[in-house]
Image: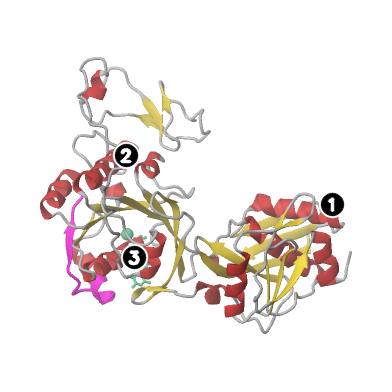
Amino acid sequence: MAKTASYSCSNCGAAHSKWSGRCDDCGAWNTISEDVPLSAGPSAKGLGAARGRGIELSDLAADEAERPRSRSGLDEFDRVLGGGLVPASAVLVGGDPGIGKSTLLLQAAAAFAKAGLTSVYVSGEEATNQVRMRARRLGLENAPVKLAAETNLRNILTTLEKEAPDVAIIDSIQTMWLDTVESAPGSVSQVRAAAHELTTFAKRRGIAVILVGHVTKEGQIAGPRVVEHMVDTVLYFEGERGHQFRILRAVKNRFGPADEIGVFEMTGQGLAQVANPSALFLSDQEAQLPGSAVFAGIEGTRPVLCEFQALVSPAPAGQARRSVVGWDGGRLAMILAVLESRCGIPFAGLDVYLNVAGGLRISEPAADLAVAAALLSAREDAALPRRTVVFGEISLSGSVRPVGQTETRLKEAEKLGFEAAIVPERSKLGRNAGIRVQKMPDLAALVGNIFGAG
Ligand code: TYD
Ligand code: MG
């Protein structure tokens, strides 16, 4: 064993000189464990011992042709990657167990193979037979994907080096182990070492590597946070239990926009792409109900309409609840406070429930106005005008601020048969918007205009 042990936090990666139950840096509990050195390389001896060799420096303006991205033809997948898989890159796909990561990546492997790339799928969790059965269920049994069931990373790297495929899928990073690391597979040091080996291998050999990672109950990739920093792209595959919709979301992408989403539906024959997510996230617009407001949002590079649903009901004495699904709880508290202090509409003593329909998660501040409209509509028990979308950011003063991509939002709404839009007053509008626009300077105007209250 090492003489001077060092410890690190699996959550934030902070180094500690001794073990403790709680990390001082990030405050997480039970995340500190002893580091086992990767190998007896120069870093283990300290830098002073040997001089490094000189490295060659090159110009920023080198004339190197950009290698084209590899498209799988699975459009929702390609878009989230930023327009296809970048050669020699490392991608991490995280998600809860059972959400469909293996299914997605087997389909992606087959799609890459059909697009003329060589793809290898290594499963550390299932036997090749199980993977074949799944492929049959997906109707992909004839796709030229190379298959292996293996967890020993040394064997895997040797094989990949020989095969030199375009794409290698490792399912999952938590099952991989290196014989140079003295802890059990799935432990922090194993996961970190395996991810490091695989990402450097991707760069060195020019092979795109896709890693599957399980997510803990707290919603983080099980294993060290540093794995997310090592890879070029981090995608999360998410969805509500009981919903068949799955959303693939880019949370980090060195080669494309983050926050891009791809939408899938889990069917009996695997994941089907949903080309028009807006239609999916909306309920019947003919029956406009109190508490519902349609938000014209932007997810990544694409407009997505979705429905905010609010319910306001009298709370049992003294303990009003605020419950949010699909949006930020802090942001909801802010809007309730602005409604109360700027418009004189109190929510004290009332339970407030807010939900984004269809299992979507919204993070844009542009949704503020739609949330306010849904809350007001629920509180007054009065439905908003039919076929109307809402967007705009609300400031603490109660004014409504313009948001980006107004035209794109309006066009998507028009395409889906919406006739009117409630937008911030200073929105930049094009000339030929075929949708009736109602401009709001502030929240009080929304209250007065829509509900005739004050
Ligand atoms: P899986 O890809 O094994 O999830 P993960 O790798 O993220 O753990 O998906 C498992 C679930 O998906 C399982 O509950 C069954 C369901 N499923 C379908 O509904 N249809 C299908 O065609 C397949 C292959 C799986
Ligand atoms: Mg799996």
Q: Residues within 10 Å of mark 1 (few under 14, many from 20)?
A: some
Q: Which residues are magenta?
A: 134-151
Q: Residues within 10 Å of mark 3 (few under 14, many from 20)?
A: many
The C terminus sits in image quarter = bottom right
Q: Quadrant of ligand 2?
A: bottom left
The residue lying furthest to the top in this view is 48
* Element type where label 3 sits in the image: helix
Earlier sequence position, callout 2 versus callout 1: 2
Residue lying at 79% horizontally and 50% vertically, measured from the top left: 397
Left or right of residue 247, residue 116 in this image:
left
Q: Does residue 357 appear in the picture of this structure? A: no
* Element type where label 2 sits in the image: helix
Is disc 3's CB within 8 Å of ligand 1?
yes
Residue lying at 18% horizontally and 75% vertically, measured from the top left: 142
Q: Nearer the viewer, residue 211 or 406?
A: 406
Earlier sequence position, callout 2 versus callout 3: 3
The residue identified by callout 2 is 192
Task: Name the amino acid type tagged 3.
Answer: Leu
Mark number for residue 341?
1
* Element type where label 1 sits in the image: helix
